[in-house]
């Protein structure tokens, strides 16, 4: 798991990658790949058996997007995983949209989320799209709380890492998580 590596070691690879060292980039992705795969596997564990997206596919698409995008000046390990969480959300939502569009003839079918505990497991494609819509609405009401949900749900980040990524205290992260869950619960009922 990436947690076994020091934040300084990962930050060093990120810095060298930013400076053009592709070996550092390759080493970084080789080391964080298992951690990212665990997150993807956790998110996909509740999908049906014949689901077309596998954890390795999610992580591979994530890596392609992170490597192929405009160069990002990652500040540190937490910032890298924050960007990875955001990108993983996009990968999963893009896949869900494509699946729903094909399944429904291009029209989305609204399926209500079963409850706030959905934040612990990835819902169906339709529910994931609904969750994405709710998170977008939450971003308008409370951007930091929405970011906490994204980092925790899609990135699997710990409260300490979320606090570092958002430059706030752990208490603030806990408060935002509680507020976000209440906000989501009110809209899910």
Image (cartoon, rainbow, N blue to C red):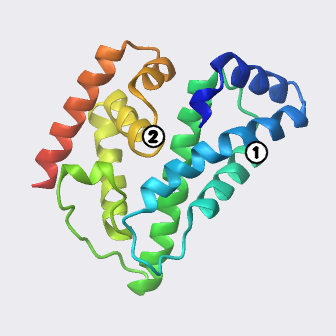
Residue indicated by mark 1: 67
Contact between marks 2 and 1 (CB within 8 A): the answer is no
Q: Position of residue 137 (x, y in %)?
A: 29, 45
Count the labels in the image: 2
Q: Is residue 105 left or right of residue 75?
A: left
Quadrant housing the N terminus: top right
Residue 177 falls in which quadrant of the image? top left
Residue at 34% in and 75% down? 108
Q: Position of residue 86 (x, y in %)?
A: 52, 42
Q: Position of residue 148 (x, y in %)?
A: 37, 32
Q: Position of residue 123 (x, y in %)?
A: 33, 62
In depth, the one of 137 and 117 nearer the eye is 117
Q: Image height check: is 30 above or below 123?
A: above
In depth, the one of 48 and 167 nearer the eye is 48
Q: Secondary structure at mark 1?
A: helix
Say which label, 2 or 1, has the lower sequence index: 1
Quadrant housing the C terminus: bottom left
Residue indicated by mark 2: 156
Q: Rounded to the nearest whole Å, what is the CA distance between mark 2 and mark 1?
A: 20 Å
Residue at 84% in and 24% down? 16
Q: Image height check: is 189 above or below 5?
A: below
Q: Nearer the viewer, mark 2 or mark 1?
A: 2
Categorize mark 2 by other alpha carbons within 10 Å: few (<14), some (14-19), many (20+). Answer: many
Q: Is residue 114 left or right of residue 25?
A: left
Q: Image height check: is 66 above or below 44?
A: above
Q: Is residue 30 left or right of residue 19?
A: left
Q: Secondary structure at mark 2?
A: loop
Which circle marks residue 6 in the picture? none
Residue at 89% in and 37% down? 22
Categorize mark 1 by other alpha carbons within 10 Å: few (<14), some (14-19), many (20+). Answer: some
In depth, the one of 59 and 189 nearer the eye is 59
In depth, the one of 156 and 74 nearer the eye is 156
């Amino acid at each position: 798991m990436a947690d076994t590596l020091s934040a300084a070691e990962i930050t060093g690879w990120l810095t060298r990658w930013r400076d053009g060292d592709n070996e550092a980039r390759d080493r970084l992705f080789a080391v964080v790949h298992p951690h990212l795969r665990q997150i993807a596997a956790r998110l996909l564990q509740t999908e049906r058996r014949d689901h077309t997206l596998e954890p390795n596919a999610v992580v591979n698409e994530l890596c392609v997007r992170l490597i192929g995008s405009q160069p990002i000046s990652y500040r540190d390990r937490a910032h890298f995983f924050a960007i990875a969480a955001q990108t993983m959300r996009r990968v999963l939502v893009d896949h869900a949209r494509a699946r729903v569009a094909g399944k429904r003839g291009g029209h989305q079918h609204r399926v209500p989320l079963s409850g706030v505990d959905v934040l612990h497991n990835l819902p169906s494609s339709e529910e994931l799209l609904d969750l994405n819509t709710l998170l977008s609405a939450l971003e308008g009401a409370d951007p930091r709380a929405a970011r906490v949900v994204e980092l925790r749900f899609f990135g699997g980040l710990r409260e300490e890492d979320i606090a570092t990524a958002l430059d706030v205290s752990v208490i603030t992260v806990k408060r935002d998580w509680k507020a976000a869950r209440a906000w989501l619960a009110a809209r899910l009922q």
